[in-house]
Structure formats: structure tokens, C-alpha cells
Image (cartoon, rainbow, N blue to C red):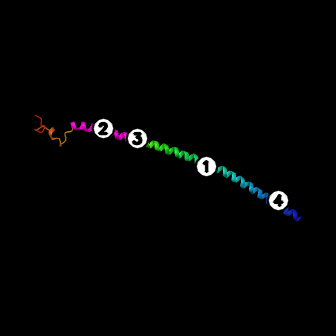
Amino acid sequence: MEYSAEMARLEQFVDTLLEKYNQLKADYHALQELAHKRENECAELKNQVLELSAERREVGQKVTGLLDRIEQWEKDQLPQETEGEANTDFGPEDVSAVPPDGGALR
């Protein structure tokens, strides 16, 4: 009888051990699958970062180009405005434009 009790106890121990092993194995496979999904997600996010960085550089270059064009346009406009203003500006420093009588009406 003692032999049967020991055998039953051993069988119970082996069954428990196998159940825990199978549970650990299932957990391991689930974690592997999760890790694989996370690696794929990480790779996708890295690609997105690279694409967004490239897009940001491109936009930055376009903005810089537009700013350069605006600055050039402003520089091109300055000589024209200065020439046009020189003929019509009768400031205090331009005394030769005032008649000798002070511009009084008769």
C-alpha cells in the first residue's frame, strides 16, 4: 500500500510539473510573439522618423529658398525706391530746391 501511495504522489508531482512546464512554454511563446510585434513596431517607427526628418529637411530648404528670394526681391526694390524718392523729396538738407524768396506766393 505504501508503494501505491508513493506512486500516486509521484504521479501527482509529475502532472503538476508538466502543467507548469506547459504553462511556462505557452507564456514563453506569447512573449516571443509580443517581442516580435514590438520589434516590427519599433522598425516602423524608425522608418517614420527617417521619413519625417527627410520631409522636415526638405521643408526647411524650401523655406530658406523662399526667404532668400524675398530678401533678394527686397534688395532689388531698394534702389528703385531710393531713385524715385530722391527726385520728390524736398527735405531741409535740399536747400537748392527752395526759391530765394522762400517760396512765398505773390
Residue under pointer 3: 65
**Looking at the rendering, in which quadrant would you find the C terminus?**
top left
Q: Earlier in the sequence, mark 4 or mark 3?
A: 4
Cα–Cα gap, marks 4 and 3 = 80 Å
Residue under pointer 2: 77
User: What amino acid is found at the position of numbered circle 4 in the picture?
Assistant: Glu
Q: Earlier in the sequence, mark 2 or mark 4?
A: 4
Count neighbours of disc 2 (C-alpha within 10 A) and say few if under 14, some if 14 to 19, many if 20 or more. Answer: few
Count neighbours of disc 3 (C-alpha within 10 A) and say few if under 14, some if 14 to 19, many if 20 or more. Answer: few
- Write the residue at 82% across / 59% down: 11
Magenta highlight: main SS: helix
User: What amino acid is found at the position of numbered circle 2 in the picture?
Assistant: Gln
Could you tell me residue 94's position as x and y percent? 17, 41
Closest to the observer, 56 or 103: 56
User: What amino acid is found at the position of numbered circle 1 in the picture?
Assistant: Glu
**Looking at the rendering, in which quadrant would you find the N terminus?**
bottom right
Tell me the quarter of the picture where residue 63 sits: top left
**Secondary structure of the residue carrying numbered label 1:** helix
Residue under pointer 1: 39
